[in-house]
Amino acid sequence: MIFGIKKDELINLGAEFTSKEINQQPKLWIETYEIVKTNKEKIKEFLSENLDKETRVILTGAGTSDYVGQTIYLYLAKKLKVRVEAIPTTDLVSNPAEFIEEDTKTILVSYARSGNSPESVGAYNLFKDNVKNIAQLVITCNENGELAKKAGEDSNSLCLLMPKESNDKSFAMTSSFSCMLLSTILTFDIENIEDNKEIVEVIANQGQDILDNKWNEVKELVELGCNRVVYLGSGYLKGLCKEMALKNLELTSGKVVTVTESVLGFRHGPKSIIDDNTLVIFMNSINDYTNLYDMDLIREIHGDEGGHKLAVISYKENKEIEQISDKYLEIGGADIDEVYTVFNYMLYGQIFGLFSSLHLGISPDNPRPDGTVNRVVKGVIIHEYNK
């Protein structure tokens, strides 16, 4: 039984894979740690040869894979003290002249569940052919994918294969997203891999508690029946909110309009989306300074007239938020580096997307059976680039 639903019923609902893949993540996080640790020497060699103060690091992917980089580029830039950018493959391929710097030493980090999407392969080839000093790190869930094969044949590339089970069978990426995210954090902090084991165990244990004991709180949010959802967050949570909004949009087949914005950016026009049937899901930062701005907007939305609902996910106990939100969800987490907290926040968003889909009678495993949107993108033609 997963999230209170028996396996046979999940199969009948078309939710077998999505539910399993959300639920398996704490176990896969431990496996991901072991994969990175096993590859410690290869990673150290790759970074020592290719990463210095002059290196440009680009994190790239499409859709959910892009949001891996969007979530952690700020963290990596601060930690590595180099130029780190999160640029989707869809931009790199369509506008290579705007992004490729031929003479700049570059590491291109490519994220891919299947490794077969045209833009992922296209971006890999573009940088290989047009940057003089290029190293490529491929983080993928499919050992048989085109990206994994290319990286395996290239002496300037390193391929990290995620746990086999992370190659999600469902339409929407869940465990693939979190494993690729975790592996990146661990890889670029490889010198501290042994010390970071404890942190991975903490987020895995906290994650299991959410999956086992707190899913019903998320289901109650869905039962409010709102047809508009807004995700709000700052810093690392801003990037994560992009992924959570996409999850709900995908899994409801677009029937629940789901958008996202930064906390301070929301007032500058996007707040216009709120009506009486809107649910605002606020991911509250553990950063004390950032939290001042979070609290200002939480109080404001609470005080606004109308029938909208406000739900706040808080990593730590916050009595004021509990009193002024329509739904208060508390992780009750241990003291860890802020970037690692995203792994527990994300579970709430993934579970919300699953239950939103089921609430509408849609199969989460295949929300678009008409084939107009696909698990692996189709219909993209990669045109020859002549600089």
Image: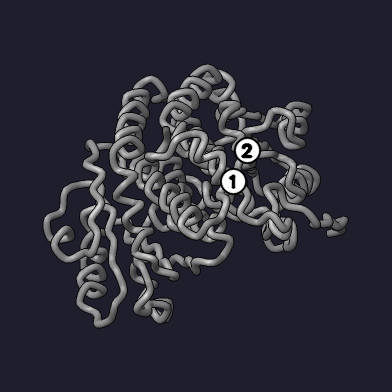
Circles 1 and 2: CB atoms closer than 8 Å: yes
Residue at the (37%, 74%) spot, across then down: 277
Residue 225 higher or lower than 153, as above or below: below
Q: Classify residue 108 by image quadrant.
A: top right
Q: Is residue 357 above or below residue 29?
A: below
The percent position of residue 308, horizontal first and vertical second, equals 31, 74
> Residue 363, percent across and down?
57, 51
Query: Mark 2 sits on what residue?
Result: 169
In percent of the image, x 53 and y 61: which residue is there?
249
Q: Please, what is the three-letter code of the amino acid marked with disc 1?
A: Asp
Which type of secondary structure does the marked residue at label 1 adopt? loop
Please provide percent x and percent y for residue 173. Answer: 56, 45
Q: Quadrant of the N terminus?
A: top left
Dot 2: within a 10 Å radius of its alpha carbon, few (fewer than 14), some, or many (20 or more) residues? Answer: some
Distance from disc 1 to disc 2, alpha carbons, whole Å, reads 8 Å
Q: Residue at x 25, y 51 (%)?
A: 329
Residue found at x 69% / y 28%: 143
Quarter holding residue 235: bottom left
Give the position of the C terminus as an image quadrant. Answer: bottom right
Tell me which corner region of the image, top left, top right, bottom left or bottom right, holds residue 191.
top left
Colour mapping: one colour
Q: Is residue 196 visible?
A: yes
* Residue that badge 1 annotates: 365
Q: Amino acid at mark 2?
A: Lys
